[in-house]
Image (cartoon, rainbow, N blue to C red):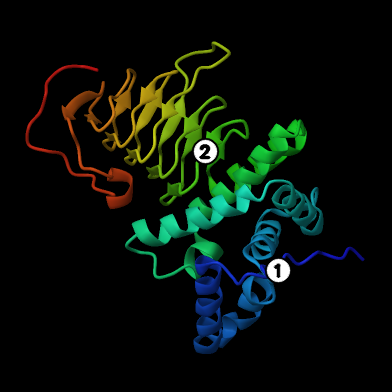
Amino acid sequence: MVQHLEIVDVAGPPPVWAALRNEAQHVAKTEPSLASLLNAVILRHGALANALSYQLARKLGDQELRAMSLREVAEEAYASDPSIVDKAEADLRAVFERDPACKGYVQPFLFFKGFLSLQAYRVGHWLWTEGREPMAFYLQSRISELFQVDIHPAAMIGSGAFLDHGTGIVIGETAVLGDDVSMLHGVTLGGTGAERGDRHPKIGKGVLLGAGAKVLGNIRVGDYAKVASGSVVLKEVPSGCTAAGVPARLVNCPTCEEPAKTMDHTLAEAVYDYVI
């Protein structure tokens, strides 16, 4: 029988982990039918890394890759690169702070496929960097099947990312996303043809990508920029600007200070009518 090492934070639990456990205890008392689930996924574990590896294994395990084997892969990733767990904590905090429908940390940790797909991707990305490409592709396939989110394991995503709803998000192989990016369902960060090499967008820090936005090609969307829902961006968006339309035009510069955190999808009255 495989023994799983509990990673106990001897300095005291981090705020997010403490809040997650407290919420889980409260829900277990008020909703006894979920007590067994909450105990198995959250309360019986000593640290966020252990709970997260269990949750991902529970969700992604199947006939070909059993949950126990998948959990061992996740634990190996966390032990090798503890920053993965730090990013998971930042991602969980981002969901709570930016999603007005989110009531706490238990909700996204158990149920939100945007958060879960992102954490599974992070394990897959570690596998990719370790040269374990077949296993990374296997995880990519499972994430797509279960959550309808398709993120290439080679893509690079910073911490504090928020995938709202998640459904239909596609992120290509050479895409790079900075910290604190928010995106809604149906976003595509793709290429413009069958060319190989560096062909996908570079998304700066604090960018907001609206529902159904398409950013195509090896172009940059600058820090704290905003892409309006349904837009098709084919050229660079300067930092702090908003792009909207098909093809996208700059509609205001500057936009709001931190669009990814405020989730402000509104457009200013002034429109600068030139194609980017």
Please indicate whether residue 9 sits to the left or right of residue 117 in the image.
right
| Image quadrant where one finds the C terminus | top left
Instruction: Provide residue 239's location: percent of width, then percent of height.
Output: 28, 29
Residue beneath label 2, please? 157
**Mark 1 neighbour density, 10 Å: few (under 14) some (14–19) many (20 or more):** some
| SS at badge 1 | loop
Report the number of discs: 2
Residue that extends furthest to the left in the rendered view of this protein: 269
Indicate which disc residue 240 carries: none
Task: From the viewer's side, name the closer residue of 34 and 258.
Answer: 258
Instruction: Provide residue 252's location: percent of width, then percent of height.
Output: 15, 31
Task: From the viewer's side, name the closer residue of 98 and 114.
Answer: 98
| Image quadrant where one finds the N terminus | bottom right
Please name the residue shown 59% across and 42% down the image: 144
Residue 238 in the image: above or below residue 105: above
Residue that extends furthest to the top in the rendered view of this protein: 195
Inspect the image, locate mark 1, and give the three-letter code of the amino acid beneath it: Val
Please name the residue shown 56% across and 84% down the image: 28
Name which of mark 2 and mark 1 comes first in the sequence: 1
| SS at badge 2 | strand
Please indicate whether residue 15 sits to the left or right of residue 215 in the image.
right
Residue 223 in the image: above or below residue 165: above
Residue that extends furthest to the front in the rendered view of this protein: 11
**Mark 2 neighbour density, 10 Å: few (under 14) some (14–19) many (20 or more):** many
Instruction: Provide residue 92's location: percent of width, then percent of height.
Output: 49, 58
Residue beneath label 1, please? 8
Mark 2 and mark 1: span between their CA atoms?
27 Å
Inspect the image, locate mark 2, and give the three-letter code of the amino acid beneath it: Ile
